[in-house]
Image (cartoon, helix red, strand yellow):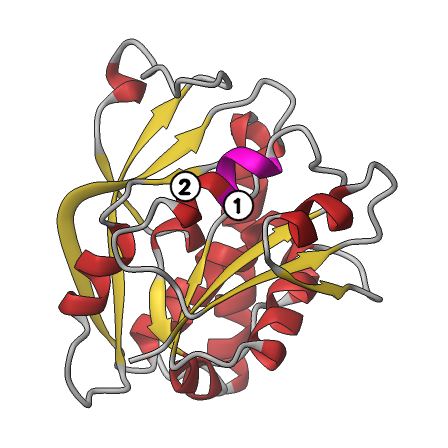
Amino acid sequence: MTITAVVCVRDGALRLPRALASIRAQTRQPDEVLVVDGRSTDGTAEIARQWGARVVEQSGRGLADARNLALAEARGRLVAFLDHDDRWMPDKLARQAADLAGPDETAYGVAHLRFVADDADGTPIDGPRGLPRLGRTPGTLVAPRALFDRVGPFDPTLGMGCDMDWFVRADAAGCRRVADPAVLLLKTLRADALSADPAVNRAAAFAVIARRLRDRRAGTDEG
C-alpha cells in the first residue's frame, strides 16, 4: 500500500522544515512526499527540494486549488495531507495505514489532534482548547486516492470552508469514517492564522451550510 504525503504551502520557509521533519520521522515512511508551492517568494520550494520532496508549482490560487492539484499529481494509493505549520506524531502513517488495511476504497481515516503553540517544541495550549479532540481536518485525513473521485475535489469557492464541505460530502456519499483514538496531529495555533479567528470559522461554516441547502433544493445533494 503506497502513501503520498502532501504539504500545500505558500511562503512557509520558516515553518515548513518542522512539518517535513515530522514526515521524515514517520515509523512508516511515505512512498512520496509532494509539496505544492503556491508561488512562494521566500525560498519555500528550494527548502522542500532540500528535504527530498517533489515540488509542484501551483498556477491557481487558494488552498482548495492546491489540494486538488496535489490529488492530480499524487502517485500513492493513499493520500495524507499536512499543513506546513503543523506536525504529525511519528506513528501517524503507520497507524492509519493499518486502520485502512483492506480493499475498501470507500473508507477514510481521521484521528485525534492537539492544539500546540507556535514554537519548536510544540508546547501544548493551556485550558480546554488544548485538550485532545477528534479532528475532521485534512491534517488528520488519510484516504484512498480513488475516494476523491467518488466524493469530488475540494471546492475552491468556499475558501476556509472547503475542508468542512469535503467531509460533509464524504459522509453524504456513504463513505466510511475510521477514527483512530490516538493523537496523531499537533496543530499549531497561530495568532495570525485565519483558522484561529472564530469569526472566520463561523463564516466558513455558514458558507458550507448555505451551499448544502442550495444543493438540496436543486436536488444535487445526495445527503
**Of the pair 95 and 199, the residue shown nearer to us:** 95
Question: Could you tell which of marks 2 and 1 lies nearer the N-terminus?
Answer: 2
Considering depth in this image, is 89 or 176 the residue closer to the camera? 89
For label 1, count other residues whose C-alpha is less than 10 Å away and answer few (under 14), some (14-19) or many (20+): some
Q: What residue is pinned by disc 2?
A: 22
Q: Which residues are magenta?
A: 16-20
Residue 182 horizontal/vertical position (percent): 15, 43
Quarter of the image with the C terminus is: bottom left
From this viewpoint, which residue is outermost toward the top? 126
Q: Position of residue 181 (x, y in %)?
A: 11, 47
Main SS of the magenta segment? helix
Percent across and percent down for residue 135 are: 30, 45
Q: Which amino acid does the dot numbered 1 rest on? A: Asp
Q: Residue at x 65, y 22 (%)?
A: 192
Q: Kindly identify the amino acid type of the residue bearing the numbered disc 2.
A: Ser
Residue at 17% x, 65% y is: 178
Task: Using the rendered view, name the quadrant where residue 8 is placed.
Answer: bottom right
Per the image, the residue denoted by label 1 is 83
Q: Dot 2: what SS? A: helix
Residue 91 forms part of the magenta stretch: no
Residue 209 at least partly seen: no
Residue 193 is marked as none
Residue 96 location (% of width, % of height): 22, 61
Mark 2 or 1, which is nearer the eye? 2
